[in-house]
Image (cartoon, grey):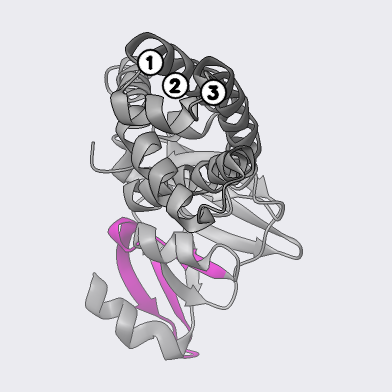
C-alpha cells in the first residue's frame, strides 16, 4: 500500500495500542528479565517487579494521552507513513522521558536524568518495536480485507472535510465532475452509476483548494472547480464569454477569461 490506511487512525485501533503495548512491556520484562534492564530496575533492592509494574502504568498513561490526541488530530494532519512513523517515535520519546524521571527519582543517587532518558529510550525502543510493528501489520491487513472487490484504490479517492475538519464525503477522482460554491457551502457534483448526483458540504472554496489541486481539478472560475478529464469542449459565445461543456448530460460550466488559456492546455 502506497498510501496511509485510515484504519490506523480509528478509535478502536488507538484503544488497542493503549492496551496491548504496555501489556507486552509488562509480560516481556517480567518473563525475560534482560540483564541490563534487571540491573537498572532492580536497583540492588529487589525492586525489579515493582518498577516494571510502575513503568507499565506510566507507558499506559502516556499512550492514553498521545493516542487520543492522535485520534482527534487525524483529520487536521495530512496522514502518510512518514507522519505516522514520526508520531510513533514521538510517543517513544514521551514514554522515555516519564520513565526516566521515575527511575531518577527512585534511584536518588545523583545519577543524571539525561542518562536515564538514554537508557529508557534504548530499552523501550528494543522492547516495543515488536508490538508496534505487529499492530501496524494487523490493521493494514484488516484494512485490506475490509476493502471490497472493485473498490477504488486509496490513491484514486478524494476525501472532503467540513469546516470542523470532520470527514464527510469520499468519492473517486474519476467520478468527480465539478464543485460549485454556494455561500457558506460547496456543492460537489459527481457520477454514480452514470447518474449525476450532488453533495452539499459546509466548507469554502479556499478550504478545499489543496484537496482539489491534489485530485487534479482546475479552478476555472471564482465559484467553480472542474475536472478537466470530463471536459468535452471549450466554447466561446458572441459576447466573448467562455464555457466548458462536460461529457455528461450537456452540463456547461462558466470559465473565467484569465483561466481560459491554462485550461485549454489541459484538455
| Mark 1 residue element | helix
| Mark 2 residue element | helix
The residue carrying pointer 2 sits among few (fewer than 14), some (14 to 19) or many (20 or more) residues within 10 Å by Cα, namely: some
Q: Residue at x 30, y 25 (%)?
A: 35
- Tell me whether the residue at label 1 lies in contact with that at label 3, contact meaning CB atoms closer than 8 angstroms: no
| Mark 3 residue element | loop
**Magenta stretch?**
224-244
How far apart marks 2 and 3 lie (CA) works out to 21 Å
Label located before the other in sequence (2 or 3): 2
Q: Position of residue 221 (x, y in %)?
A: 52, 77
| Image disc number at residue 45 | 3
Q: Residue at x 49, y 83 (%)?
A: 256
| Image disc number at residue 16 | none
Residue 79 appears in the picture as rendered: no
Q: Nearer the viewer, residue 95 or 164?
A: 95
Is residue 242 magenta-colored?
yes
Is residue 21 magenta-colored?
no
- Tell me whether the residue at label 2 lies in contact with that at label 1, contact meaning CB atoms closer than 8 angstroms: yes
Q: Nearer the viewer, residue 248 or 173?
A: 173
Q: Residue at x 51, y 52 (%)?
A: 111
Q: Position of residue 23 (x, y in %)?
A: 50, 15
* Quarter containing the N terminus: top left
Q: Nearer the viewer, residue 160 or 27?
A: 27
Residue projecting furthest to the right: 184
Q: Position of residue 252 (x, y in %)?
A: 47, 63
Q: Position of residue 167 (x, y in %)?
A: 59, 42
Residue 241 appears in the picture as rendered: yes
| Residue pointed to by mark 2 | 25
| Image disc number at residue 28 | 1
Q: Is residue 213 above or below residue 229?
A: below
Q: Is residue 199 above or below residue 54?
A: below
Amino acid at each position: 500500500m502506497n498510501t496511509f490506511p485510515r484504519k490506523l487512525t480509528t478509535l478502536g485501533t488507538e484503544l488497542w495500542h493503549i492496551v496491548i503495548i504496555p501489556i507486552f512491556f509488562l509480560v516481556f520484562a517480567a518473563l525475560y528479565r534482560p540483564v541490563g534492564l534487571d540491573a537498572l530496575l532492580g536497583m540492588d533492592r529487589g525492586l525489579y517487579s515493582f518498577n516494571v509494574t510502575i513503568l507499565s502504568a506510566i507507558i499506559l498513561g502516556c499512550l492514553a494521552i498521545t493516542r487520543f490526541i492522535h485520534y482527534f488530530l487525524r483529520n487536521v494532519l495530512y496522514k502518510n507513513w512518514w507522519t505516522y512513523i514520526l508520531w510513533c517515535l514521538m510517543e517513544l520519546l514521551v514514554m522515555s522521558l516519564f520513565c526516566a524521571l521515575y527511575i531518577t527519582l527512585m534511584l536518588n543517587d545523583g545519577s543524571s536524568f539525561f542518562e536515564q532518558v538514554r537508557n529508557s529510550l534504548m530499552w523501550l525502543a528494543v522492547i516495543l518495536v515488536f508490538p508496534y510493528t505487529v499492530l501496524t501489520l494487523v490493521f493494514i491487513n484488516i484494512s485490506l480485507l475490509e476493502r471490497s472487490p472493485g473498490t477504488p484504490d486509496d490513491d484514486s479517492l478524494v476525501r472532503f472535510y467540513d469546516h470542523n475538519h470532520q470527514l464527510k464525503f469520499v468519492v473517486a477522482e474519476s467520478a468527480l465532475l465539478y464543485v460549485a460554491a454556494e455561500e457558506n457551502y460547496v456543492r460537489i457534483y459527481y457520477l454514480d452509476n452514470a447518474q449525476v448526483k450532488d453533495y452539499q458540504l459546509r466548507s469554502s472554496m479556499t478550504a478545499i483548494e489543496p484537496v482539489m489541486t491534489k485530485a487534479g481539478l482546475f479552478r476555472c472560475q471564482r465559484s467553480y472547480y472542474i475536472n478537466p478529464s470530463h471536459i468535452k469542449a471549450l466554447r466561446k459565445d458572441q459576447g466573448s464569454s467562455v464555457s466548458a461543456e462536460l461529457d455528461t448530460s450537456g452540463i456547461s460550466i462558466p470559465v473565467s477569461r484569465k483561466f481560459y488559456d491554462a485550461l485549454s492546455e489541459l484538455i
